[in-house]
Image (cartoon, rainbow, N blue to C red):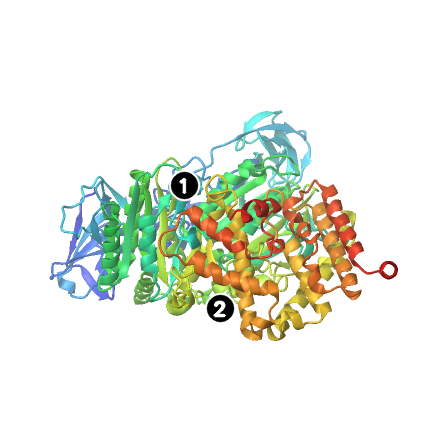
């Protein structure tokens, strides 16, 4: 094992004289507490090390031990339902204060039943059998992607802990490797896949404004920029609770401790309506709160995506929520400053953009090495300074994501949530999802989406005009546009994350609501064309149930939507002056 | 405690706050030191960097008056700590935890590191207990809960001091016993008269004997200012999590703290980020603000109410901007409302309490509270929008509904935000319902039909 002794230390950076050989990005253990660090520079017999933990008390002469491997984490089935720090060390079962130093996860026990036999040829990333945890879904025992060969031995069915080797594989060069339920994988290396698949299906988020207007693909990438107080965290939490993924990896990167406490309290109580299981069972939480060491924040994003890739390789659809990538970028900036690197735009290092690309490019819909279909969808929050979207992190992220969900201060101030701005946000290739919606009961999806977006766009133009000439001076048709756009906002886009029936809107509910609102717009347009005064629309009886339907009608109550729709038809029918009615009126008069 | 080591006559260079020594003793990074010179004053410092031959000491007080040949450095052998014990309430300390009220020293029981270790999120309890502050704009619209960190974003000349003092004296828990309630006050770069104002107000309210005051006055050393909140929060954590009290920590003025951080950073020659502030301003502020919360099984809680004055009332300035990203909301004061005689001049639209959802509703305040607050927000936002419209097209050009919103906005500021004395929560609720009566019921989309029928007819 290579050793080194500290020569100089300041903050989280140290230089040390080596005895033996170190390689770049090698993982090291520093001092008696075995603090984790990484070699970031080599110069003759001197290495520069970035330490991921508080370095208080270290002094010249302290010894450093090389691990002879890059920074790696242990991925396995026992991650589900638990909370870890940025370097994937467990936060449960330790003190109330997070102290620096090494600590390993306590092994957990799972039931194993083998599916392969001795003598089988095993490829990297293939499954050796089924794992059944005490709670939660069954998973596969995956061979590490970089191990392949002949199965020499395998244990019989039974309960084992997750670090004991259960099978042995003899590789082509004759070496025998033990395979346990969990294995180690370097965080900065993407896990290999058989091939990437085209993305033609949305990840249903349960948020109407996202699914209807700005969908993200299963295996796609979305960014959520927003100034402070615009509801990034609440939206990400709503997505973690409501989106239709099999596994959620929630990364709290430089965020608040109290919020994580809230997530930790709430998730175990909520039930996933799709599987009937506790939401916590499908969730892995990785927490580096804002007061934890900065250097570990830089690594936490890679830990999170490696965990997500592991579950993808199980043939599952994984959603990764990163809150917030700006804190990660700032950690990168801070660490870069300590190395004395030349600062680029906004003080960030020049490689910010390529690091962001490396991260976002690990999102994909794939065929796994085991031949199954899995995906990682990444949703990253951005906290731009002063809410200015032209800053480096937002502008670089925009180049790599397909869905951009811009949060708006004005909407947030009126407590209009989710505060996604319909004109600043976008989703590329949304039209590709129309066939999926067709199959899932919303044949008009693309047409209604286009109409809603046009209405909202026109509204912003008309409101500017109304500010100059007054609303009443607008022609009837334009007043109608304003009324309809208001309805789209209030009845459809606004969604109450804290109302039990409104928290998550399933595809069927979204389709029903879109249809009813689309029908209202049609009827109202006819009515106004036939001479109805636009301000009469605001006094319609059917309007209030329409605006309240999101909060008052649940996903499993389609008949109530029918009733709202029927009431709407009836009221307009009585209102629109058709030629026959005019004749009747004349006869009566 | 480890034996203390002395280093004499080995200072080689002094540059601003940095002191370079030949390395004659074996000490670790971040350990505390006491530097004294011929003038006999001791100055606190810490080991900022170490290599084989030299030690770099960051002196946290003025280095003026030090001569290389006369410097004596005492090594404490551990990171900077604060010795605390019972009886710190009712006492006055300077910015680095030394008693300055002329009384006896604190009977110390244990020394706590002033940097504090980060709390494990698993050990935190979700803050839930509603605190009634007596201010409608907070209680009704942006409720404060025990364990929250809620700053007041203010500006020079606005009555933030008065508001903080009022909250400190009026705050009470809506639920459960009165418990042990304590106040820790940290004044950073505070003018003498402001410090005196707080002391007097707390005394008048009868709160002084349950308050610990930490004063770093405007004339005191600015490097010491970086230590003041750390000493104060260490004391607050001790009171909350060792003695089990419910502590309200008032930190004022965070802007002075950040200015001091910038000053020290630039004297160390670090690369500046936005507006000359160091790139680690966010992380540094987080180490202070995150020291609030409820810890499982400790009995006590630590609530933070920090005050910061926004330079030129600019909420996008790095100090309020980064603060807003860390704290659980903010209360924003408005110069415009202040000029119009609204007191307290809280601008509710940019104000926010992120933990409100956890501490309001049936179990905590009132079942209709969340819906009422949401409806008031929506209506007031529309009123403000209508005001802009009215400024251009004139009030006559507005529709009937818009005119009602305009009247609502005026009433909201005059009769709900504005208040003469403390208001109970029930009174705040009633004021809210009364205001909503003036609006068309069909437009109250954030209330259910049942709520409209039950509450609006009664109010």
Mark 2 vs mark 1: in front: 2
Chain ID, mark 2: A
State which quarter of the image contains the N terminus of chain B: top left
Q: Is residue B249 left or right of residue A445?
A: left
Percent of width and height locating residue A435: 78, 52
Residue carrying label 1:
A102
Residue B115 visible at all: no
Residue carrying label 2:
A345
Between B104 and A89, which is closer to the camera in this rendering? Answer: B104
Q: Is residue B335 left or right of residue A562?
A: left
Percent of width and height locating residue A15: 36, 55
- Tell me which numbered mark, 2 or 1, is placed earlier along the sequence: 1
Percent of width and height locating residue B354: 47, 51
Which numbered circle lies on residue A284?
none
Determine the residue positioned at 19% across, 61% down. B11
Q: Is residue A555 left or right of residue A12?
A: right
Above-or-below relation of B131 to B165: above
Between A123 and B241, which is closer to the camera in this rendering? Answer: B241
Between A135 and B189, which is closer to the camera in this rendering? Answer: B189
């Amino acid at each position: 094992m290579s050793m080194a002794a500290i020569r100089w230390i300041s903050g989280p950076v140290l230089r040390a004289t080596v005895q033996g050989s170190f390689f770049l990005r090698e993982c090291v253990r520093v001092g008696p507490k075995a603090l984790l660090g990484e070699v970031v520079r080599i110069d003759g017999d001197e290495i520069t090390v970035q330490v991921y933990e508080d370095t208080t008390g270290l002094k010249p002469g302290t010894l450093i031990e090389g691990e002879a491997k890059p920074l790696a984490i242990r991925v396995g089935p026992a991650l589900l339902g638990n909370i870890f720090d940025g370097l994937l060390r467990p936060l449960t079962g330790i003190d109330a204060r997070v102290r620096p130093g090494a600590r390993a996860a306590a092994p957990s026990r799972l039931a194993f039943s083998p599916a392969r036999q001795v003598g089988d040829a095993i490829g990297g990333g293939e499954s050796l059998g089924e794992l059944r945890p005490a709670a939660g879904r069954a998973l596969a025992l995956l061979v590490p992607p970089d191990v392949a060969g002949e199965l020499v031995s395998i244990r019989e069915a039974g309960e084992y802990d997750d670090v004991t080797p259960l099978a042995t594989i003899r590789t082509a060069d004759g070496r025998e490797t033990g395979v346990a339920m969990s294995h180690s994988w370097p965080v900065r290396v993407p896990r290999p896949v058989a091939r990437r698949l085209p993305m033609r299906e949305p990840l249903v988020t349960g948020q109407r404004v996202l699914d209807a207007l700005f969908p993200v693909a299963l295996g796609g990438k979305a960014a959520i920029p927003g100034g402070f107080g615009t509801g990034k965290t609440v939206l990400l939490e709503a997505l973690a609770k409501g989106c239709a993924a099999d596994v959620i990896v929630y990364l709290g990167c430089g965020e608040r401790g109290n919020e994580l406490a809230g997530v930790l309290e709430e998730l175990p109580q909520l039930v996933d309506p799709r599987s009937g299981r506790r939401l916590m069972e499908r969730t892995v939480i990785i927490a580096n709160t804002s007061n934890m060491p900065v250097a570990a924040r830089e690594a936490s994003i890679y830990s999170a995506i490696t965990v997500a890739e592991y579950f993808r390789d199980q043939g599952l659809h994984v959603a990764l929520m990163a809150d917030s990538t700006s804190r990660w970028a700032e950690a990168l900036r801070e660490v870069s400053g300590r190395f004395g690197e030349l600062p680029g735009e906004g003080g960030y290092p020049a490689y910010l953009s390529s690091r962001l690309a490396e991260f976002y490019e690990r999102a994909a819909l794939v065929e796994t090495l085991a031949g199954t279909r899995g995906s990682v969808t990444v949703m990253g929050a951005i906290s731009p300074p002063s809410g200015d979207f032209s800053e480096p992190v937002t502008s670089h992220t925009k180049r790599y994501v397909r869905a951009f969900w811009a949060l708006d201060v004005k909407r947030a101030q009126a407590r209009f949530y989710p505060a996604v701005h319909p004109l600043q946000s976008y989703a590329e290739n949304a039209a590709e999802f129309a066939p999926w919606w067709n199959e899932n009961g919303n044949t008009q999806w693309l047409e209604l989406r286009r109409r809603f977006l046009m209405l909202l766009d026109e509204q912003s133009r008309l409101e500017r005009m109304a500010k100059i000439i007054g609303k009443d001076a607008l022609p009837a048709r334009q007043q109608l546009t304003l009324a309809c756009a208001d309805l789209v906002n209030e009845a459809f886009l606004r969604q109450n994350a804290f109302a039990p029936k409104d928290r998550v809107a399933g595809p069927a509910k979204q389709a029903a609501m879109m249809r009813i609102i689309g029908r209202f717009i049609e009827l109202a347009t006819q009515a106004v064309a036939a001479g109805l005064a636009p301000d009469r629309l605001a006094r319609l009886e059917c309007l209030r149930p329409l605006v309240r339907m999101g909060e008052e009608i649940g996903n499993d109550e389609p008949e109530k939507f029918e009733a709202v729709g029927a009431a709407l038809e009836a009221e307009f029918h009585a209102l629109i002056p058709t030629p026959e009615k005019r004749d009747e009126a004349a006869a009566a008069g | 405690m480890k034996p203390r080591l002395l280093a004499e006559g080995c200072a080689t260079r002094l540059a601003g706050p940095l002191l370079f020594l030949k390395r004659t003793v074996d000490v670790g990074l971040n350990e505390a030191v006491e530097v004294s010179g011929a003038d006999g004053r001791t100055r606190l410092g810490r080991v900022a960097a170490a290599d084989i031959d030299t030690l770099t000491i960051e002196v946290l007080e003025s280095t003026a008056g030090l001569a290389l040949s006369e410097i004596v450095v005492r090594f404490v052998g551990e990171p900077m700590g604060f010795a605390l014990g019972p009886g710190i309430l009712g006492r006055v300390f300077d910015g680095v935890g030394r008693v300055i009220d002329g009384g006896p020293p604190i009977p110390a029981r244990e020394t706590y590191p002033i940097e504090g270790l980060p709390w494990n999120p698993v050990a935190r309890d979700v803050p839930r207990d509603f605190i009634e502050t007596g201010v409608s704009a907070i209680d009704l619209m942006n409720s404060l809960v025990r364990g929250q960190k809620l700053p007041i974003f203010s500006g020079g000349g606005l009555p933030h001091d008065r508001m903080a003092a009022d909250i400190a004296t009026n705050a009470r828990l809506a639920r459960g016993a009165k418990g042990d309630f304590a106040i820790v006050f940290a004044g950073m770069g505070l003018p003498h008269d402001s410090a005196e104002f707080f002391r007097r107000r707390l005394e008048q309210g009868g709160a002084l004997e349950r308050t610990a005051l930490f004063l770093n006055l405007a004339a005191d050393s600015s490097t010491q200012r970086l230590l003041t909140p750390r000493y104060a929060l260490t004391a607050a954590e001790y009171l909350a999590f060792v003695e089990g009290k419910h502590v309200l920590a008032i930190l004022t003025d965070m802007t002075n703290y950040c200015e001091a951080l910038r000053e020290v950073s630039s004297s160390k020659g670090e690369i500046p980020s936005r507006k000359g502030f160091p790139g680690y301003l966010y992380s540094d502020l987080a180490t202070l603000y995150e020291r609030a919360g409820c810890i499982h099984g400790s009995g006590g809680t630590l609530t933070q109410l920090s005050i910061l004055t926004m330079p030129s009332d600019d909420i996008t300035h790095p100090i309020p901007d980064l603060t807003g990203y860390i704290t659980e909301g903010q209360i924003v004061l408005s110069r415009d409302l202040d000029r119009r005689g609204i007191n307290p001049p809280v601008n509710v639209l940019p104000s926010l309490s992120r933990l409100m959802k956890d501490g309001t509703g049936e179990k905590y305040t009132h079942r209709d509270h969340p819906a009422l607050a949401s409806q008031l927000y929506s209506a007031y936002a529309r009123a403000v929008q209508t005001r802009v419209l009215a400024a251009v097209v004139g009030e006559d050009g507005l529709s009937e509904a818009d005119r009602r919103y305009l009247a609502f906005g005026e009433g909201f500021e005059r009769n709900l935000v504005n208040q003469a004395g403390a208001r109970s929560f029930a009174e705040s609720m009633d004021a809210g319902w009364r205001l909503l009566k003036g609006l068309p019921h069909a437009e109250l989309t954030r209330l259910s039909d049942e709520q409209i029928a039950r509450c609006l007819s009664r109010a």
